Image (cartoon, rainbow, N blue to C red):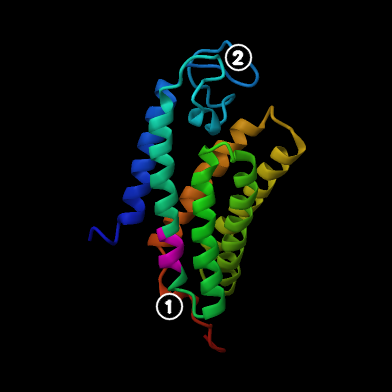
Amino acid sequence: MLKKYTVLAGILTSLFLMLVATMVYPGGSLSDKNSVGFDWSKNFISNLFAAKAVNGSDNPSVLWADAGMIFLSVSFALFFIEFSKKIPVKSAANVIKYLGVAGMVCTFLIVTPLHDLMVTIASTLFLVSIFYITVFVLKSRLHVFKFLCIICLLIFYFTLYLYGSGSYDFLPIMQKVTFFTTIILIVALEYFTKKEDFQPIKAGK
């Protein structure tokens, strides 16, 4: 039972730790350096990982946010490892497993000074892994999951477009939307799909 719900437990622990981090964040955002506390529509999640808050104060959210990111990265890595076992094509399963895990290593490194580089690498590896998963979902009869996968990819791509184009006004909100839709997709794929769902559909069935 414990092993079965490891991914979910890790994600919930991560969310709790990140929530605490937002509650102890001193303040300051890109749009208002003198703001107080963490504004979900103005602050970036990356603000939680800096030694100094945007307003110049010491940032006590660092330890909470770093711990949250560790749990999230490990949980997602475990997901990619376990989900790859459901894929009948070995080469595709290996892409999902190895690129997914590598992407999660880079995701954790986002909390370091290598932030910008790691965002690019982690996003690319993650999207490739999810794209491979989406291909197999589209071949299945998991119609709700087809919608979830496509929506998740579109939201992720749009958020990356905002990030790359420097459109920061709406980016903090889309960052949170991407974060939560990704979690929903991962949890749904982990606990509401099985290996048989991805076996080739025989003609006439």
- How many numbered circles are shown? 2
Instruction: Please report the residue visible at 69 percent of the width from the left and 30 percent of the height from the top.
Output: 168
Could you tell me which secondary element the residue under label 1 belongs to?
Answer: helix
In this view, which residue lies farthest toward the bottom? 203
Q: Which residues are magenta?
A: 78-83
Instruction: Please report the residue visible at 61 percent of the width from the left and 31 percent of the height from the top.
Output: 172
- Asked whether residue 108 is in view, the answer is yes
The three-letter code of the residue at mark 1 reads Glu
The answer to whether residue 166 is left or right of residue 17 is right
Instruction: Please report the residue visible at 56 percent of the width from the left and 19 percent of the height from the top.
Output: 54
Mark 1 is surrounded, within 10 Å at the Cα level, by few (under 14), some (14 to 19) or many (20 or more) other residues, namely few
204 versus 89 height, above or below:
below
The answer to whether residue 171 is left or right of residue 77 is right
The residue labelled by disc 1 is 196
33 versus 197 height, above or below:
above
- Rendering coords of residue 166 (x, y %): 74, 33
How far apart in space, not on screen, are marks 2 and 1 (Cα)? Answer: 53 Å
Instruction: Please report the residue visible at 57 percent of the width from the left and 62 percent of the height from the top.
Output: 129
- Rendering coords of residue 62 (x, y %): 43, 29
In this view, which residue lies farthest toward the right? 165
- Rendering coords of residue 52 (x, y %): 51, 21
Q: In the rendering, which numbered label is found on residue 33?
A: 2
The three-letter code of the residue at mark 2 reads Lys
Could you tell me which secondary element the residue under label 2 belongs to?
Answer: loop
159 versus 139 height, above or below:
above
Image quarter hosting the N terminus: bottom left
- Asked whether residue 184 is drawn in magenta, I would say no
The answer to whether residue 204 is left or right of residue 4 is right
